[in-house]
Image (tube, rainbow, N blue to C red):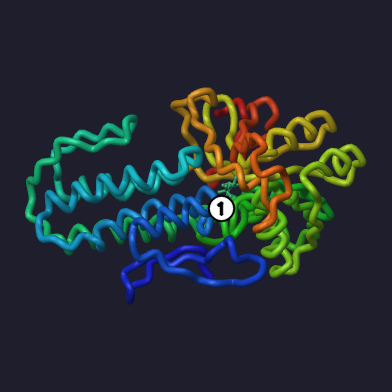
Amino acid sequence: MRTIEWNDIENCIEIIDQTRIPLKLEKTFCKTIDSLLNAIKSLKIRGAPALGAAGGLGIALSAFQYGGEDREEMLGAMISDAKRIKDVRPTAVNLSWGVNRVLEKVLKNRRFDCICKLENQRFSNATTLSEESIEDIRRFALEEAERICEEDVKINRMIGENGAKLLDDGDIILTHCNAGRLACVDWGTALGVVRSAVEMGKAIKVFACETRPLNQGGRITTWELMKDGIDVTLIADSSSGIVMRNKMVDKVIVGADRIVKDGVFNKIGTYTHSVLAKENKIPFYVAAPYSTFDLERTGREIIIEERCADELRKFGKTYIAPKNVKVFNPAFDFTPIENITSIITEKGVLDPGEI
Ligand code: MRU
């Protein structure tokens, strides 16, 4: 089953609602750009590669949503939707990557004389030179977005195969957050490596860190692995020290939201695990596709998304902290390149020096 795909009957995006897992496996529809923005913000759809697909399909949705007959106006609406989608979650680069890839394809196909200022996330000076219909534009956008989805599954399989060679029979892996099927269109990056190793016949066990405050590890990683019959043990984020120091872990594998020149952004808490892994001489691997690389930038240039205070003050509907306590709730942190053993990609395993 796919985490995200286009629904041809309703002409909308269909996603697995990740906020319902593990209680329910439920699909939901994004029929408007507003509902897509809401799904991304509330983490119904989440994880870098899945966000790349959401960005691409979002541009197709924008094209299908346009109700007029003026191609210039249609393009203007798509460009403004592109900006809204990219702004919802600024740290995971795949979201902008997916949006830009589909928008650029449409602009190129239409032979727009287009100045693409991706830096400013702005497309301007569009002048029509060809006669493609509104239906053609919709088709171009949807074909490219669906190509992103198809490629994602293949790429994750390749990451899995490359990474699985690094795992030994009997290894115990620590992972953080969810970099599995549900974070991608299918298979997964960090968990894709585990899945591929198991498929090769290796006995692999996993420690899943719960990943406060939204518990993607506790809710989603454990659920995914148990469903596949892979041995998984849930630990509190703060237990990663004891399991590493007591040699209960052979390797750490995490996903990535953005890989820059000098390090990797991933779910808050990843940096802490990397320091502990280094201290305890445990290999620390990052598994990610090339679409997560942003090698023009350094860590200092990237905005770290800060999320709402109630994610920490409340558990469900109940306050577990004073209602008015000050909160700092970054969604991601930065792991410097020197803490990383290798980066597992679809094209092979990279030494940090190769970045
Ligand atoms: O806030 P989230 O749940 O979108 O954060 C996700 C992560 O940090 C994942 O580890 C990352 O996107 C890699 S997913 C293959």
| The image quarter in which residue 333 lies | top right
Label 1 SS: helix
Q: Residue at x 77, y 49 (%)?
A: 173
Q: Amino acid at mark 1?
A: Met
The response on whether ligand 1 sits within 8 Å of label 1 is no
Q: Position of residue 44 (x, y in %)?
A: 52, 59
90 up-or-down from 103: above or below: above
Q: Nearer the viewer, residue 221 or 280?
A: 221
130 up-or-down from 261: above or below: below
The answer, for residue 79, to whether it is visible in the render is yes
The residue carrying mark 1 is 158
| The image quarter in which residue 21 lies | bottom right
Q: Residue at x 49, y 54 (%)?
A: 50
Q: Residue at x 53, y 65 (%)?
A: 17
Q: Position of residue 200 (x, y in %)?
A: 71, 61
Which image quadrant: the C terminus? top right
Q: Position of residue 168 (x, y in %)?
A: 79, 50
Left or right? Give the position of 62 relative to 313. left
